[in-house]
Image (tube, grey):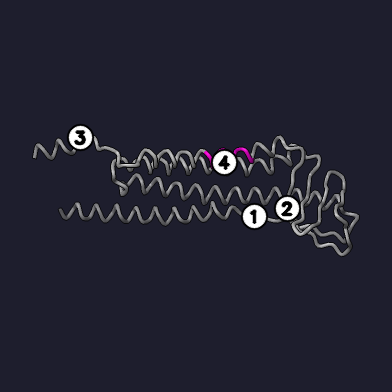
Amino acid sequence: MRHDIEQARRPRTAPAGQWAFEAVTAGAVALGTLLAAASAIGVLIADNLVVPVTVNPTTDLGPQTTAGRFTLTPQDAALLTVTEPTVGDRLWIFGPALLLAAVVATAGGLLWRVVRSLRSADPFHPRNARRVGAAAAVLLLGGALAAALQAAGHLALVSAARHAWQPDRTLTLQAVIDPPVAVLLLGLGLGVAAEFLRRGTAMRADLDGLV
């Protein structure tokens, strides 16, 4: 009995490769956060803003057409360039990118703590289920909010461009909305993983009760 108590109190050593696993996870989280943050900062310092659009003209616009501070390149993937973006224009694009960086950092931090907890070789600890569930919620809610803000920003810029081309009734501009599919799918996957961990934790508690 005394031997069992001493064994329980003795600190558990990390499994082989645990430190490398933690380092890779931390590096991936840091890289994802830096890339998202760099995208947001790039919007603030760029001379122009570029928004993907679809164009449905009834006349040939040529390789490029300009109206006010907007330039349209009507190719296969049409691009609307804001040549003189205002502070409001930049914020519409900067806000979602910055939010996405915060989402990646928060969810990544929670997952890193789950990886770090594997030092004790106990993946079915209740804390891990809560952390994975929280990471899933952050990705789903934050990703959806970032997508909504990005859509609102693109719609606002395209609406302003329509007014600039108002005399040309033959030109129809539509904003292209690209939701963060990868972020949302990762959030759904983590939601499933959180449910698996919760059930594993409940099953282990039931088994401990039988013993």
Circles 2 and 3 in contact, beta carbons < 8 Å: no
Q: Nearer the viewer, mark 3 or mark 4?
A: 3
Q: Position of residue 115 (x, y in %)?
A: 38, 43
Q: Which residue sits at x=78%, y=50%?
A: 80
Labels 2 and 3: the sequence-earlier one:
3
Magenta portion: prevailing SS class: helix
CA distance separating discs 1 and 4: 17 Å
Residue type, label 1: Asp
Please tell me which residue lies in front, 3 or 148.
3
Label 2 residue SS: strand
From the image, which quarter does the N terminus lie in? top left
Q: Where on the picture, by quarter, is residue 88?
A: top right
Binning the other alpha carbons within 10 Å of mark 4 as few (below 14), some (14 to 19) or many (20 upward) gives: many
The residue where tag 3 is placed is 10
The residue where tag 2 is placed is 52
Please tell me which residue lies in front, 47 or 163.
47
Label 4 residue SS: helix
CA distance separating discs 3 and 4: 40 Å
The residue where tag 1 is placed is 178
Residue type, label 2: Pro
Circles 1 and 2 in contact, beta carbons < 8 Å: yes
CA distance separating discs 2 and 3: 59 Å
CA distance separating discs 3 and 1: 52 Å
Residue type, label 3: Arg
Labels 3 and 4: the sequence-earlier one:
3
Labels 2 and 4: the sequence-earlier one:
2
Binning the other alpha carbons within 10 Å of mark 1 as few (below 14), some (14 to 19) or many (20 upward) gives: few
From the viewer's perspective, tell me whether residue 98 is left or right of residue 26.
right
From the viewer's perspective, tell me whether residue 197 is left or right of residue 159.
left
Residue type, label 4: Ala
> Which portion, as a residue range, is magenta?
31-39
